[in-house]
């Protein structure tokens, strides 16, 4: 298992487990289809690890405005 997924930091950053799963899944499809990694890809790094590292480094995120999904801050205010 990837250690970063054990931390609540990445879940809070995206706004929940389901949003995190959707973001990782969408990015994995892009990477498999040939998109360039937005972080340094170390030897042996899987596409899943790349996607997670991109989230941790704020290289990718959910476009809340375009998708009309509540942001994590909006959820906390309720």
Image: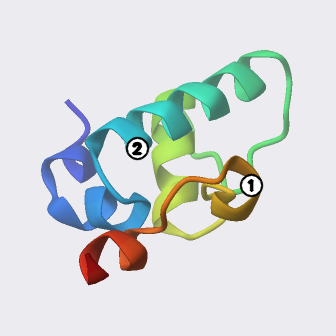
Q: Is disc 2 in contact with disc 1, using a CB cutoff of under 8 Å?
A: no
Query: Which one is nearer the viewer's eye here, 43 or 28?
Result: 28
Q: Which comes before the other along the chain, label 2 or label 1?
A: 2
Residue 76, percent from left and from top:
26, 77
Residue 8 can be seen, yes or no: yes
Q: Residue 25 or 44: which is nearer the viewer?
A: 25
Q: Residues within 10 Å of mark 1 (few under 14, many from 20)?
A: some
* Image coordinates for residue 75, horizontal then vertical, percent: 32, 69
Look at the picture and state if 64 lies above or below 47.
Answer: below
- Element carrying mark 2: helix
Q: Where does label 1 land, which residue?
A: 38
Whether 44 is drawn above or below 76: the answer is above
Please identify the residue farthest to the front as the structure is shown.
78
Q: Residue 51 at what x, y percent from top left?
A: 55, 42
Look at mark 2 in the image and give the residue it sits on.
20
* Mark identifier at residue 14: none
Query: Element type at marker 1?
Result: loop
């Amino acid at each position: 298992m990837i250690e970063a997924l054990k931390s609540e930091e990445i879940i809070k950053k995206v706004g929940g487990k389901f949003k995190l799963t959707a973001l990782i899944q969408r990015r994995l499809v892009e990477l498999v289809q040939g998109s360039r990694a937005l972080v340094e890809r170390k030897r042996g790094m899987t596409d899943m690890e790349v996607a997670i590292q991109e989230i941790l480094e704020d290289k990718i995120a959910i476009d809340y405005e375009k998708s009309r999904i509540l942001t994590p801050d909006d959820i906390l205010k309720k």
